[in-house]
Image (cartoon, helix red, strand yellow):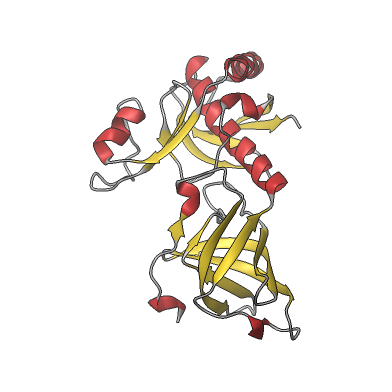
Amino acid sequence: MATELGPTKLAYFDDMWALQSTSILLSLHQSEDGRSALILESTIFHPQGGGQPADTGSISNPSSGFKFVVEDVRLKDGLVYHYGFFESSQDGSESSFKEGEEVSLHVDAPRRDLNSRLHSAGHLLDICMQNVGLGYLEPGKGYHFSDGPFVEYKGVVPLDELQTKQKELEIEAAALISRGGKVLASVVPYDEAVNWCGGDLPSYISKSSTPRIVKLGNNPGCPCGGTHVADIADIKTLKVTQIRTKKGLTKVFYSIGL
């Protein structure tokens, strides 16, 4: 049945800070590995991707007597799969839920806050790299899983500059965080997205598309599907823990304060 469903509306695109909402339950999916997943009409849960781990939380309906604990969220072919397990129901099984009923969504606030701050810090590093004279490095992938958080760039930094640039990045990040600035995210036409991003977009973005652009303060924006802080100051602190250059790539590792 899941393959016949339309795309899940990504409600967090409209409101990155929503932690509670309602939606319509469309289907219970059983994956090949035996995991159960709920598919909804819309979701505020962020699926794993773009370097950002998935949200966790719960989906429930008190009138039906079920609570589904969300342990993982994935996006595939336009559908968002909320993986987890039924914590309780009137008869001890998942039979108490009904397709088409309204359900309540609750996102785990501390996890969302941490992931949003980490993700925003990675974008802030991109801005800092430009400001300290490392703009010749081409941004690549970034992760804040167990082997991160880090941002990877194509290109190398001379070995004798690594320590100096690490200190400059920290000073620049502290200045930007202290200054603050609102964070905006919007799905816009391609030409408008180009303007938001300072006149340039990655080649993988089609000119016929309407990309989602995230903009930190008055700095140039960038394409991103993740969640972010409301203000740059909400990152609190950013420490560059290491810069590593190897095989034509540079990794900038960082951490954020509590």
- What residue sits 61% from the left and 60% below the top? 105
23 on left or right of 95: left
9 on left or right of 106: left
Percent x, y of residue 19? 61, 49
Who is closer to the viewer here, 229 or 21? 21
The part of the image, by quadrant, that contains residue 240 is top right
Residue ranking furthest to the front = 63
- What residue sits 69% from the left and 24% below the top? 237
Who is closer to the viewer here, 67 or 166? 67
182 on left or right of 83: left
- What residue sits 30% from the left and 46% below the top? 210
Task: Reply above or below: 245 against 79.
Answer: above
Task: Reply above or below: 188 against 137.
Answer: below
- What residue sits 52% from the left and 64% below the top? 23
Percent x, y of residue 191? 24, 35
**Total marks drawn?**
0
Percent x, y of residue 16? 53, 43
Task: Reply above or below: 198 against 97.
Answer: above
Q: Quadrant of the C terminus?
A: top right
Whether residue 148 is visible to the viewer of this picture, yes or no, is no
Who is closer to the viewer here, 150 or 97? 97
Whether residue 37 is visible to the viewer of this picture, yes or no, is yes
Q: Quadrant of the N terminus?
A: bottom left
The part of the image, by quadrant, that contains residue 148 is top right
